Image (spheres, rainbow, N blue to C red):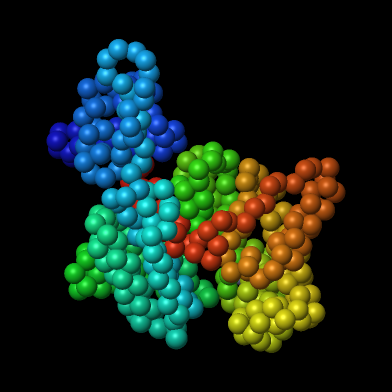
Amino acid sequence: MTITGDQKFLKNINRMALVRLIRSEPGLSRADLATHTGLTKSTVSLLVQELIDEGWLAEDDALVTGSIGRRPTPLRLDTTRLALIGGDLSLDFVEATATTLTGEVLEIVTRQNPRNDVDEILAALADAILTVSRHVQDQGRSILGLGIGVPGPVHASSGVLRSSAAAGWKDVPVRAALEQHLTAGGLPIQPILLQRRAACAALGEVEFSSMQIDEPLLYIHLGLNVGAGMFVRDRLLSGHGGFAGDVGHQQLVPDGPLCTCGRHGCAEALISLRAMSEALGVTPNEFKARLAVGDAKAHDVLRYAGHYLGVMLHNLWSTFDPAQIVLGGPCCRLGDAYVDAARNTLNQLAAQAGLSSPNVTVTRFGEHAVSIGATALVLHQLVRPV
Ligand SMILES: [Zn+2]
């Protein structure tokens, strides 16, 4: 690295430290920032001006302090000039979302995948990304980057999805394919970052929370598949080979129902939307319809799955001791019985050991948690240059 490169890098570390400070405490002035960071006032002023020019920060009206001299001007994140783009790549649908720096949704486009053809699915995702990106550009916003939630472990530097057991995909060059489509569409967005779907959703909780995050934070995605994202010490836990969080294949019932991975009794074969639908011998949509009309058998299946979700949460809780557990994904919207049954089982198991159980909440981002989380992946990377 050249000296100039080093200086640029150091400058960016300082710039993003200012952004993180203002994000956690909106209203800080330039003088406050100098005190908090130990940077000189003139350096802070220079960096703040750059960040204002680029659309990261905005100034509010100066405070009336009663003292003589220049009044401190409160600073905050600017939500009007920049946009983050996120994509959700899954087997049954694709989704693209644009958000502001604070996670406010600007636009969401969702498209169903008629067949399991990964090239077709990537083209549909690129098309959805182009649609939301053009929309925010028409609003005069600049795009900071693109994050993609993918259904399996990724090789981060090459942008390749290593495998997805449920979809039957292996070594899919997701980044290269999207680069090609976006360039052909006249919008070569950079950078393009990839992360597992549940890990993206975990970042959405962390980056777009207005409150202090309790760490470790464990996020569980519950849909056709089951995955987890763990946020600890200000970082995602990705594991040695990017496989951390593949909790859907922990065995809960030896000799239980057959799983997509070839083993029996995995969590995914008991608590996923796929498993619940198969237990009734219907499609996921038919299962949802039967729940909606109060079908007793469908509700029994939902409670039974919720119970095993509680067992899985107990196992994860006793392994990682998370301060916060957040649930998300389509299963959480099937009915209260699912999460209630999980909480009951978790509470019972904790009580048996004389412990009070952890706090379990459901994500506020609903069915869009992954694509919104994918926009948070971009922000996460940009504000932490080291
Ligand atoms: Zn499995």
Instruction: Dividing the image into four quarters, tell me where ligand 1 lies.
Output: bottom right
Q: Residue 28's quadrant in the figure?
A: top left
State whether residue 227 appears in this view: no
Q: Residue 78's quadrant in the figure?
A: top left
The quadrant of the rendering that contains the N terminus is top left
- In-image side of 276 versus 45 (left or right): right
The image shows residue 386 at horizontal and vertical percentages of 34, 39
Question: Which residue is outermost to the top?
Answer: 68
User: Vertical placement of 175 versus 79: above or below?
Assistant: below
The image shows residue 202 at horizontal and vertical percentages of 51, 53
Q: Residue 188's quadrant in the figure?
A: bottom left
- Residue at (36%, 41%) from the top-left corner? 77
The image shows residue 168 at horizontal and vertical percentages of 48, 78
- Residue at (26%, 55%) from the top-left corner? 141
User: Vertical placement of 52 versus 112: above or below?
Assistant: above
- In-image side of 214 versus 350 (left or right): left
- In-image side of 66 versus 234 (left or right): left
The image shows residue 276 at horizontal and vertical percentages of 68, 77
State whether residue 121 appears in this view: yes
- Residue at (44%, 86%) from the top-left corner? 115
- Residue at (76%, 62%) from the top-left corner? 341
